[in-house]
Image (cartoon, rainbow, N blue to C red):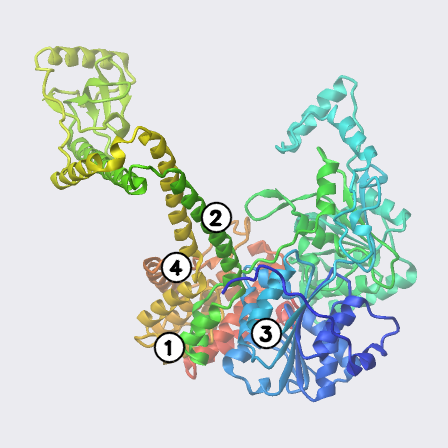
């Protein structure tokens, strides 16, 4: 499958009577793109809607719901996270009635057979694989936040759903603005058929760009910002010159802080530079704003409420504490009362000790002042409290990590970026234009704000031109993260058979994008092929076929080069063999290099890598040197032996002098004209073939052409271009059918382990077990069940062992050595690791990427929590945040539940369900219907 060269051109479709009825319920007129997208839905087409955050694209999804109810069919509204599902369920239930709207989020089921059901995308994927009867009469599926398919961990689910839905289902895909929407839409059209593409780059609220330096807010651009353009079409053609005042400030700062902006120095070094400048009476401008000062300025300018992005959880919490210490209060008495009620509701069901461990009093005090943090380390109930307060306009400033840029609808009047650098898990890197667009897209509330504002805080060595580049480009390409898994393979084979499953996987967006790259390679091959024809035409000779003659010459050169490489390889192998045999005291020849001549071996230098011997010798120049294979292009010759003292120490001058004297005395007594290495003659068969080709070449009519070498130079260009073409063809072959090839390898592994039949065409009982486990280490978990790893464990031990299959420590999370809580759990974990190694070896043999290693860093906490340990004690022991603790515990519970279902009736299922009951308590149970 290949991507089309041009995006499909949609013919205008006029809205019908359903749209007229639907639109009449809105107190405002709908935008042209919303009207166009709804018209396509009413016309029976699928549609991809790509529009900026806050532009109202969910209207199109709600129209699909309206159409389903009006025509007597079902509509599933899918979202990426539970919190969004809960939010959408309440919105739709309020509009259409609780009797007609249901909710399914895996652990929550409300009116699941209603005509409209809101669900997480994973729930729909599982329903498709199970062939659920609930899919009957399904007419529409709305995929909200469909750009999540780029997510490295969960993105494949979106493609599984899009590929797996029945052809009769209209898919309404809602996406943030992506720069390759046409490519994504073209794939949807090819896979689903009849999919229209509706793209709007128009922001409903203009976005103005600023930089805060010191206590002043400057416009980023000299003229109107490209993002403030609200007309139809693209703003890319607008001029985006940087405000000259910012350029002046950057130059003024650079006079005092002499530092390379491309190489970040430590704070101590920068402070030292500034202290030295101050000592000379040169004090630069104080341009970096304090957090409390920045918030006060935003309030004074009427730019609150604001989302203040800090790319660090600890930084967000510190910012809240700084504002508390500064005494800032942003709320009225009435607002404080409402926020107090929200905070108390969030704490409902939690004991006094738990609240103390969670720092609830500080959270509540800050919330009452209109200040809060929002990040994945917070308890879900607290995050939802912040979200509710912000949406209602009660919370004025939220210090957030970048995760807030996705998911929950929390628009603000302003967005603040403290820095333009973030830690990506490996290094500190600049944010991309796409990330900048996502972060600042929250600014400007439709129907509330006339304009939105993005404010970048000044930081040392800031280049205003870099900020302008981020703010004026909208590059956010959607890249597929799809890759077949073991669970996916058994489910698809069970549902449609192996061959059809393979064909479906070839329709994935990942393969579509890969094939688009193959199209580019094909064009390059075509261009080079045309060039080769022209070169051979230029090399034409009047006396005969010069292409034939050139190919004879090339064949001779290739044979001679291959023979030379073979001889070189033989010499290297002989040299290694000879060096492995030398002993201390051997006097050897060093055939090349700076130390060419004779040397006595002090240490043979044979380490773990026997292919890289590095003897330590004394040379004729009385130097002790460590040699390498580069000094031995041919094997050394051992001419004689001498005694090297057992306790010789090269660091002692006396030892070196004594050995040198003995070495030269021994050299004087031996024949140093000993015959050196003679390379082996060229292979007789190769020599005969070269001789035959040379005779053929000399007899060729072109051999005597006076312009032979000129023709040959052109012919060599043609041959070199042909080699380039061959290389491009190999690249193309590697990129074609990559997804299906991985699927084939996975099926081979599954057949070898008994999850598929020997011909890998049908699913076995073991495969049906694996089909119930949706985990990154799904095959390891299934193998553990089959091997009886969990059979003798208690419920807490079972949960602890299973935690290793789902937990993965963040950088810096593991501050003390992890251990298993009991001897039985330790024995079981040893078996888990053995199974993981066996699976990894099989994956290596089939050239599949290994699954990550099991991590026992959460095992002891899981065991203790199941045993009733206090939250505060566990947070202190694990040094995890409350949000992380709850999130990992919920993931453990989820996998334990999958193991219970997969194991079937028996002790393992009973103990797994007992473990779930023990783990679902306190903050974990209170957060069960929330999302992390």
Gap in angstroms between the C-alphas marked 1 and 2:
52 Å
Which dot, 3 or 4, sits closer to the camera? 3
Gap in angstroms between the C-alphas marked 3 and 4:
33 Å
Which dot, 3 or 1, sits closer to the camera? 3
Asked if one can make out residue 342 in the rendered structure from this viewpoint, the answer is yes
Gap in angstroms between the C-alphas marked 3 and 1:
36 Å
Residue under circle 2?
A: 527
Q: Are marks 4 and 1 in contact (CB under 8 Å)?
A: no
Q: Position of residue 727 (x, y in %)?
A: 39, 47
Q: Residues within 10 Å of mark 2 (few under 14, many from 20)?
A: few
860 horizontally vs 416: left or right:
left
Q: Earlier in the sequence, mark 3 or mark 1?
A: 3
Residue under circle 3?
A: 193
Q: Residues within 10 Å of mark 4 (few under 14, many from 20)?
A: some
Q: In what element is the residue under mark 4?
A: loop
Residue under circle 1?
A: 766
Gap in angstroms between the C-alphas marked 2 and 3:
33 Å
Residue under circle 4?
A: 848
Which dot, 2 or 3, sits closer to the camera? 2
Q: Earlier in the sequence, mark 1 or mark 2?
A: 2
Q: Position of residue 873 (x, y in %)?
A: 59, 59
Q: Earlier in the sequence, mark 2 or mark 4?
A: 2
Q: In what element is the residue under mark 3?
A: loop
Q: In what element is the residue under mark 1?
A: helix
């Amino acid at each position: 499958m290949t991507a089309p060269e041009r995006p499909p051109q949609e013919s205008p479709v006029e809205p019908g009577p359903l749209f007229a009825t639907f639109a009449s319920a809105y107190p405002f007129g709908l935008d042209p793109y919303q009207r166009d997208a709804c018209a396509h839905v009413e016309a029976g087409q699928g549609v991809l809607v790509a529009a900026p955050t806050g532009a109202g694209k969910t209207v199109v999804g709600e129209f699909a719901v309206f159409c389903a109810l009006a025509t007597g069919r079902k509509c599933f509204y899918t979202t990426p996270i539970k919190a969004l599902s809960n939010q959408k369920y309440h919105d739709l239930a309020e509009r259409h009635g609780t009797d007609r709207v249901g909710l399914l989020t895996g652990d929550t089921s409300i009116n699941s057979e209603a005509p409209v059901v809101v669900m997480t995308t994973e729930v729909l994927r599982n329903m498709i694989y199970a062939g659920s009867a609930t899919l009957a009469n399904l007419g529409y599926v709305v995929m909200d936040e469909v750009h999540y398919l780029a997510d490295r961990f969960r993105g494949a689910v979106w493609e599984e759903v899009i590929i797996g839905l029945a052809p009769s289902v209209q898919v309404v895909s809602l996406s943030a603005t992506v720069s390759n929407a046409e490519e994504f839409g073209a794939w949807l059209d090819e896979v689903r058929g009849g999919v229209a593409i509706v793209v709007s780059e128009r922001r409903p609220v203009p976005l103005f760009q600023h930089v805060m330096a010191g206590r002043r807010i400057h416009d980023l651009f000299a003229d109107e910002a490209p993002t403030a353009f609200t007309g139809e079409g693209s703003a890319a053609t607008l001029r985006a010159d940087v405000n000259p005042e910012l350029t002046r400030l950057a130059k003024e700062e650079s006079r005092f802080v002499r530092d390379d902006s491309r190489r970040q120095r430590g704070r101590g070094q920068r402070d030292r530079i500034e202290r030295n400048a101050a000592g000379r009476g040169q004090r630069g401008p104080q341009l970096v704003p304090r957090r409390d000062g920045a918030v006060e300025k935003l309030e004074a300018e009427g730019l609150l409420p604001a989302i203040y992005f800090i790319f660090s959880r600890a930084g967000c919490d510190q910012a809240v504490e700084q504002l508390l210490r500064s005494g800032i209060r942003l709320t009225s008495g009435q607002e404080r009362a409402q926020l107090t009620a929200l905070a108390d509701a969030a704490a409902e069901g939690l004991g006094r000790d738990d609240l103390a461990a969670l720092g609830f009093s500080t959270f509540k005090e800050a919330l009452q002042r209109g200040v809060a943090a929002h990040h994945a380390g917070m308890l879900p109930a607290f995050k939802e409290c912040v979200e509710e307060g912000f949406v209602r306009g009660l919370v004025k400033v939220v210090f957030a990590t970048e995760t807030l840029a996705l998911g929950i609808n929390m628009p603000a009047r302003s967005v603040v970026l403290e820095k333009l650098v973030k830690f990506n898990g490996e290094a500190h890197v600049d944010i991309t234009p796409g990330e900048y667009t996502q972060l600042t897209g929250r600014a400007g509330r439709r129907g509330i704000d006339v304009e939105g504002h993005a404010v970048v805080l000044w930081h040392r060595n800031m280049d205003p031109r870099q900020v302008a580049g981020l703010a004026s480009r909208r590059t956010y390409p959607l890249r597929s993260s799809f890759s077949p898994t073991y669970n996916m393979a058994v489910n698809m084979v069970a549902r449609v058979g192996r061959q059809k499953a393979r064909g479906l996987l070839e329709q994935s967006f990942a393969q579509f994008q890969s094939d688009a790259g193959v199209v580019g390679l094909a064009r390059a091959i075509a261009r080079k092929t045309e060039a080769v024809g022209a070169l051979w035409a230029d090399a034409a000779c009047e006396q005969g076929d010069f292409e034939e003659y050139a190919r004879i010459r090339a064949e001779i050169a290739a044979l001679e080069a291959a023979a030379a490489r073979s001889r070189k390889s033989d010499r290297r192998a002989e040299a290694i063999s000879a060096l492995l045999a030398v002993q201390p005291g051997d006097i050897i020849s060093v055939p090349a290099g700076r130390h060419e001549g004779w040397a006595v071996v002090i240490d043979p230098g044979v380490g773990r890598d026997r292919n890289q011997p590095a003897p330590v010798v004394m040379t004729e120049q009385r130097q002790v040197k460590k040699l390498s294979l580069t000094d031995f292009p041919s094997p050394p010759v051992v001419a004689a032996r001498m005694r090297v003292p057992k306790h010789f120490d090269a660091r002692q001058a006396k030892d070196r002098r004594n050995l040198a004297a003995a070495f030269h005395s021994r050299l004087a007594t031996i024949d140093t004209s000993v015959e050196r290495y003679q390379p082996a003659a060229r292979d007789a068969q190769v020599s005969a073939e070269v001789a035959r080709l040379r005779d053929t070449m000399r007899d060729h009519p072109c051999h005597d052409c006076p312009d032979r070498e000129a023709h040959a130079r052109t012919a060599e260009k043609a041959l070199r271009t042909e080699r380039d073409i061959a290389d491009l063809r190999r690249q193309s072959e590697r990129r074609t059918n990559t997804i299906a090839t991985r699927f084939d390898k996975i099926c081979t592994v599954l057949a070898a382990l008994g999850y598929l039949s020997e011909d890998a065409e049908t699913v076995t009982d073991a495969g049906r077990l694996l089909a119930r486990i949706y985990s990154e280490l799904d095959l390891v978990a299934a193998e553990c069940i089959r091997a009886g790893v969990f059979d003798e464990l208690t419920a807490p031990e079972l949960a602890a062992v299973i935690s290793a299959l789902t937990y993965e420590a963040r950088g810096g999370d593991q501050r003390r050595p992890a251990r298993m809580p009991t001897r039985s759990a330790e024995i079981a974990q040893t078996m888990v690791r053995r199974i993981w190694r066996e699976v990894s070896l099989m994956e290596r043999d089939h050239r599949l990427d290994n699954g990550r290693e099991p991590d026992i860093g959460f095992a002891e906490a899981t065991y203790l929590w199941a045993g009733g340990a206090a939250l505060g004690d566990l947070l202190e022991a694990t040094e995890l945040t409350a949000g992380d603790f709850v999130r990992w515990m919920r993931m453990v519970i989820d996998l334990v539940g999958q193991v219970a279902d997969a194991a079937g009736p028996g002790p393992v299922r009973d103990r797994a369900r007992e473990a779930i009951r023990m783990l679902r308590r306190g903050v974990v149970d209170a957060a069960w219907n929330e999302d992390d």
